[in-house]
Image (spheres, helix red, strand yellow):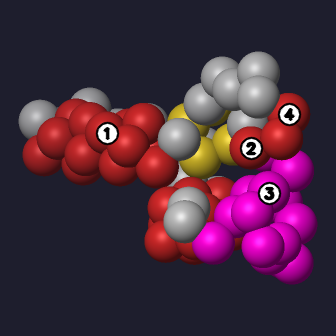
Amino acid sequence: MAHTACEMIWRKNLMMELNFKQSGTMLMHCYNQSAIYIIENHLFHKRTKQIEVDCHFVRDVWTKKLVAF
């Protein structure tokens, strides 16, 4: 999800440089309910220590309303 969110932000910035404006949030399709729960939940569990950096990045993008699920 972090790689996809990064690509979406890069593409949005590229389109803005080419004078194509997009209003609103970009929709990310994710059917992994566990991943969505981890992003929306502010508590980390022992099993999510390895993906903590990716979760922080996706959570920041999600809270800034750049990406929606």
- Asked which secondary structure carries label 4, the reply is helix
Using the image, tell me which numbered label, if any, was put on residue 38: 3
Range shown magenta? 36-49
Tell me which numbered mark, 2 or 1, is placed earlier along the sequence: 1
Q: Is residue 4 above or below residue 2?
A: above
Identity of the residue drawn at 62% across and 31% down: 27
Crowd tier of the residue under label 3, counting other residues whose Cα lies within 10 Å: few below 14, some 14–19, many 20 or above: some
Do tag 4 and tag 2 residues touch (Cβ < 8 Å)? Answer: yes
Disc 4 crowd, CA 10 A, few/some/many (<14, 14-19, 20+): few
Circles 3 and 2 in contact, beta carbons < 8 Å: yes
Give, as a three-letter code, the residue at label 4. Gln
Q: Is residue 7 magenta?
A: no
Residue topped by disc 1: 7
Q: Which mark is residue 16?
A: none
| Labels 2 & 1 near each other (Cβ < 8 A) | no
| In-front residue for pair 15/40 | 40
Label 1 crowd (10 A; few <14 / some 14-19 / many >=20)? few
* Tag 2 residue: 35
Q: Secondary structure at mark 2?
A: helix
Q: Position of residue 30 (x, y in %)?
A: 69, 26
